Image (cartoon, helix red, strand yellow):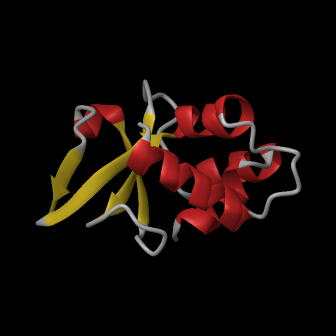
């Protein structure tokens, strides 16, 4: 899954709930963190780890693979809904993903 696919799941509440179940995410975690495999890019594979596993490190290594923290899942939703005001503007999932990535690379 890449960032565009993830956006399609997380901006729709019903799909978000299905995503949690499908990905077997730990709902008891203090925070779920979105990581990108190897680099921060639109093409990077997305992984979500509980903060307890990653210690909130910006770079997390697992099985010899480097993962770079994108955002906590809740924070990404907050950015989309409030801070960057990307919802209900008719933007595509790709446009939202590009804006989030741009924000992460330049402003965060």
Relative side of 53 to 91, left or right: left
Q: Residue furthest top?
A: 30
Quarter-of-image position of residue 6: bottom right
Relative side of 55 to 75, left or right: left
Percent from the top left, x then y, of residue 42?
49, 69
Quarter-of-image position of residue 29: top left
Quarter of the image with the C terminus in it: top left
Relative side of 106 to 82, left or right: left
Q: Residue furthest left?
A: 64
Percent from the top left, x then y, of residue 22?
60, 58
Report the front residue among 85 and 5.
85
Report the front residue among 42 and 52.
42
User: From where the camera sits, is residue 24 visible?
Assistant: no
Percent from the top left, x then y, of residue 17?
71, 45
Quarter-of-image position of residue 51: top left
Which residue is pictured at 45% across the width and 75% down the height?
43
Report the front residue among 2 and 41.
41
Which residue is pictured at 76% across the width and 53% down the height?
15
Q: Residue furthest bottom?
A: 43
Report the front residue among 9 and 102.
102
Q: Residue furthest front?
A: 106
Which residue is pictured at 78% across the width and 64% down the height?
92
User: From where the camera sits, is residue 19 visible?
Assistant: yes
Would you place residue 25 above or below residue 65 in this image? above
Percent from the top left, x then y, of residue 56?
28, 33
Would you place residue 21 above or below residue 52 in this image? below
- Total numbered badges shown on the rendered structure: 0
């Amino acid at each position: 899954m890449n960032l565009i696919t993830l956006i399609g799941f997380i901006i729709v509440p019903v799909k978000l709930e299905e995503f949690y179940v499908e990905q077997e995410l730990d709902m008891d975690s203090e925070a779920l963190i979105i990581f990108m495999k190897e680099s921060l890019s639109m093409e990077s594979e997305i992984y979500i780890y509980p903060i307890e596993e990653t210690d909130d490190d910006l770079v997390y290594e697992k099985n010899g693979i480097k993962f770079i923290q994108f955002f906590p899942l809740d924070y990404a939703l907050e950015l989309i809904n409030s801070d960057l005001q990307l919802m209900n503007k008719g933007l595509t999932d790709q446009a939202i993903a590009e804006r989030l990535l741009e924000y992460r690379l330049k402003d965060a």
